[in-house]
Image (cartoon, grey):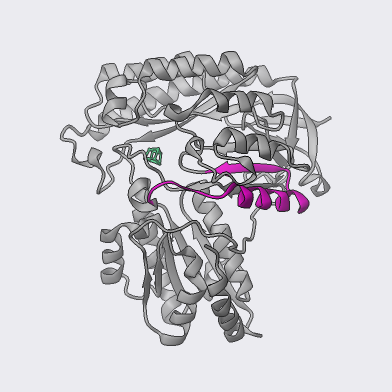
Amino acid sequence: MNIENQEDFIEKVSKLNDGKNMKYSVYTMGCQLNENDSEKISGMMEKMKYSNTTKIEEADCIIFNTCCVRENAEDKLFGKLGEVKKYKELKGTIIAICGCMMQEKHIVEKIKKSYPFVDIIFGTHTIHKLPEDLYTALCSNKNVIDILDIDGEVIEGLPIKRNDRAKASVTIMNGCNNFCTYCIVPYVRGRERSRSPENIINEIEELARAGYKEITLLGQNVNSYKGNGSLGITKFSELLRAVNKINGIEKIRFISPHPKDFTDDVIDAIRDCDKVCKMIHLPLQSGSSEVLKKMNRKYTKEQYLNLVHKMKSRIPNLTLSTDIIVGFPEETEEDFKDTLDVVDKVNFEQVFMFIYSRRVGTPADKMEKQIPDEVKHERFNRLKSLVESKIVENNKKYIGTIQDIIVEGRSKTNNNMLTGRTDSNKVINFEGDDSLIGKAIKIKIISEHMWYLKGEVV
Ligand code: SF4
């Protein structure tokens, strides 16, 4: 499906905006898939003659792209809505909300009741209809609610405004079939739908022609990607090999794979493809087989460790990162010690740690023995100490090494430095001028810090 029927509305909104210097702001909450959706929203807005502003008070249209994975995302959104209400009252700013939180009925009800000034609510399956919804809101002064409960089709051909000059994310599939018991994603993003290999490869070839050097393939569960056979591609390993052949692309990353679907052909493709970073993000979630069963993760502690062993023995210099949830319902001290044990054994390069938070509508929310907050925090702090001690140990190996990086831009934390990342996804900051941005260069690492490395151009 593509967006041809939206071209009319793009045209109509553009006419309304002619000569008016209209501005928009997109506020993105959530994961890289959401960020990629926001780039598409920005692409559509710019086609409708809005220009971007980071000053929310200047915007004529404010769009919140929400995420429902973490609980405090709701508080954040409602706080922001309280803040922007004054712009609606002062100058009639259009307020729109989209993203996975809008697929949750109780949230939409709350917005309708408590924030009636919101003009447009659209869901994850109707993002492409923004031009039509915006035109209706602008012309009719009515609230527009455009949400599909059923799984939407894969939408192709949306305009896109990339945030970066050197690296780009490409969504290869939407949705998830796994139903981990703590996760709301399958309920809000629907079942897995893979994009056609031809469309993915065309998009990446276009990015390469535009000078992009690093590609991240995105999906909730990338290694269950199923190609429709176009270009002879039916599975993820074949897609990786095809992307690896694209001239101009120098680094390929992907997130997130699921350990249960990590087949040998994917491991071999990572090993064989020179552009694929030898770094795998392999979400563990818990080191306890008991907890993993309750999470419906479909692997045990032993299976996870065996998989890691196999990957490390087949892929030289492989590094791993992971996600861990602390304080899942019924997690005992022994279960938690199993998590610490896996962290100790695997030596992850990065660990994204989360304290379990209940999500309405998930099976884990209904489990009786929820863990008290103080226990969750105490365990989280113990895990954090172990992870940090491992990071300090790991970082030392980088000193004096030469790293091939793509220069991404100015560091977000220090505007005097440029930034890039190792293949293992460690941030490197170094001095240099803007002419290096977007280039592939070599950096010598001169010092290590907890969350980044410092280097100098070779
Ligand atoms: S694999 Fe599990 S955690 Fe990941 S999106 Fe699917 S249900 Fe959620």
Residue 233 or residue 245, whichever sits in front: 233
Vertical comparison of 144 with 103: above or below: below
What is the residue that sits farthest to the left in this orientation?
368
Magenta-drawn segment: 190-218
Vertical comparison of 447 with 219: above or below: above
Residue 208 shown in magenta: yes
Residue at 49% in and 70% down: 130
Residue 143 shown in magenta: no
Q: Which image quadrant for residue 18?
A: bottom right
In-image side of 124 versus 347 (left or right): left
Residue 205: x %, y % from top left: 72, 49
- Which quadrant contains ligand 1? top left
Residue at 29% in and 30% down: 327
Asked if residue 298 shows in the view, the reply is: yes
Quarter containing the C terminus = top right
Residue 38: x %, y % from top left: 54, 58
Residue 23 or residue 34, whichever sits in front: 34
